[in-house]
Image: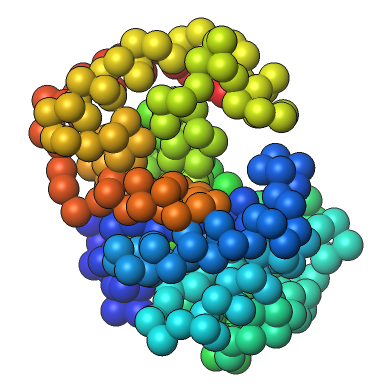
């Protein structure tokens, strides 16, 4: 593995994070302004109390609502919080100057002077990885962010971003991709291994497959809203996976979710499950600070090997 650069070392020390996609998102997560905020606040407090300090948001989550809520919570706590947010490459953002401008707007919504990690949310339909990284390097130079990363960049694009930053003396801190027992593409196509090799922190979003790995859903009881129809096929393949998770959970005195999250940690990823209430936040935090055995990891690998895509 490449030596992890000093400025990125903090990310490698983080074992578990909290994803703030659900904060303000009505379409997928059914967020209700006002009534959802109390649970979200509790999830923030519990996470910090249980040592989960890395919080990942984005300017597009709830059209800025997620960043505003996070900023408000940070102001009301005396505990340190590591903040990551993201630049969304809308087609009308066609030059590198849009990147520092977007970060300044995010900082204003959160009431912060800088963030710990700024990420490009998706590859841009207009700007090349090289142009995007010029804009990101500008953010570092202006002191608006401590480190920069990418999200939804598979290996080829990630390597272009890595090289472009390296030419400016900046190391690519992270790559955030969907990764869970039900979505193992990053492991199978070599992106995860390449991240480890280059000292890039691999951040796993949807590590519980949007709730499917919590054990509470089945064909008879699908998730609400768009998730239910999207996952009809996958729900049929779920029973043997949940059964294996339950067996391992019993051995360790853990929950099904905690075992699913621990599997991603054992693979060398930093999971950022979402939470919209105290119970979920507490459950998520219990996925860290322990390790299942290599045999148990292998059992989970085997039972999910044939599951290709969702």
Q: Is residue 283 above or below residue 132?
A: above
Task: Where is residue 230? Give x, y as percent.
Answer: 67, 22
Q: Quadrant of residue 255?
A: top left
Locate residue 175, reporting x and y percent: 47, 55
Q: Residue at x 25, y 61 (%)?
A: 2
Residue toward you, 67 or 127: 67
In this rendering, would 46 be left or right of 196? right
- Horizontal and vertical percent position of residue 211: 50, 34
The residue lying at 55 percent from left, 11 percent from top is 219
The quarter holding residue 113 reads bottom right
Q: Is residue 11 visible?
A: no
Indicate the quadrant containing the C terminus: top left, top right, bottom left or bottom right. top right
Q: Nearer the viewer, residue 214 or 261?
A: 214
Q: Residue at x 60, y 26 (%)?
A: 223
* Quadrant of the snapshot with the N terminus: bottom left
Judge whether 9 appears above or below 152 on screen. below
Position of 237 with respect to 100 (left or right) is: left
Say whether residue 18 is visible.
yes
Residue 152 image offset from top left, x and y in percent: 58, 47
Q: Is residue 200 left or right of residue 71?
A: left
Determine whether 175 is above or below 247 in the image.
below
């Amino acid at each position: 593995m490449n030596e992890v650069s000093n400025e990125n070392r903090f990310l490698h020390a983080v074992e578990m994070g909290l994803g703030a996609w659900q904060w303000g998102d009505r379409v997928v997560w059914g967020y209700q302004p006002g009534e959802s905020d109390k649970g979200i606040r509790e999830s923030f407090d519990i996470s910090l109390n249980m040592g989960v300090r890395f919080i990942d948001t984005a300017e597009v989550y709830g059209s800025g609502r997620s960043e505003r809520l996070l900023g408000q919570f940070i102001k009301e706590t005396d505990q340190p919080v590591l903040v990551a947010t993201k630049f969304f490459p809308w087609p009308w953002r066609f030059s590198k100057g849009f990147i520092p401008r977007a970060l300044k707007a995010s900082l204003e919504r959160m009431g912060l002077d800088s963030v710990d990690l700024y990420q490009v949310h998706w590859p841009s339909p207009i700007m090349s990885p090289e142009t995007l990284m010029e804009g990101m390097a500008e953010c570092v130079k202006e002191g608006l962010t401590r480190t920069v990363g990418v999200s939804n960049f598979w290996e080829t694009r990630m390597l272009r971003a890595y090289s472009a930053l390296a030419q400016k003396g900046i190391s690519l801190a992270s790559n955030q991709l969907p990764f869970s027992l039900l979505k193992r593409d990053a492991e199978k196509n070599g992106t995860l291994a390449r991240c480890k090799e280059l000292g890039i922190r691999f951040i796993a979003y949807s590590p519980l497959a949007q709730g499917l790995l919590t054990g509470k859903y089945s064909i008879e009881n699908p998730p609400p809203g768009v998730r239910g129809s999207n996952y009809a096929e996958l729900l049929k393949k779920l029973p043997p996976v949940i059964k294996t998770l339950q067996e391992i959970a019993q051995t360790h005195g853990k929950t099904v979710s905690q075992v699913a999250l621990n599997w991603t940690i054992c693979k060398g990823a930093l999971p950022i499950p979402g939470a919209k209430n105290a119970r979920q936040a507490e459950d998520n935090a219990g996925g860290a600070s322990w390790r299942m055995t290599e045999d148990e990891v292998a059992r989970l690998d085997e039972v999910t090997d044939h599951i290709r895509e969702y």
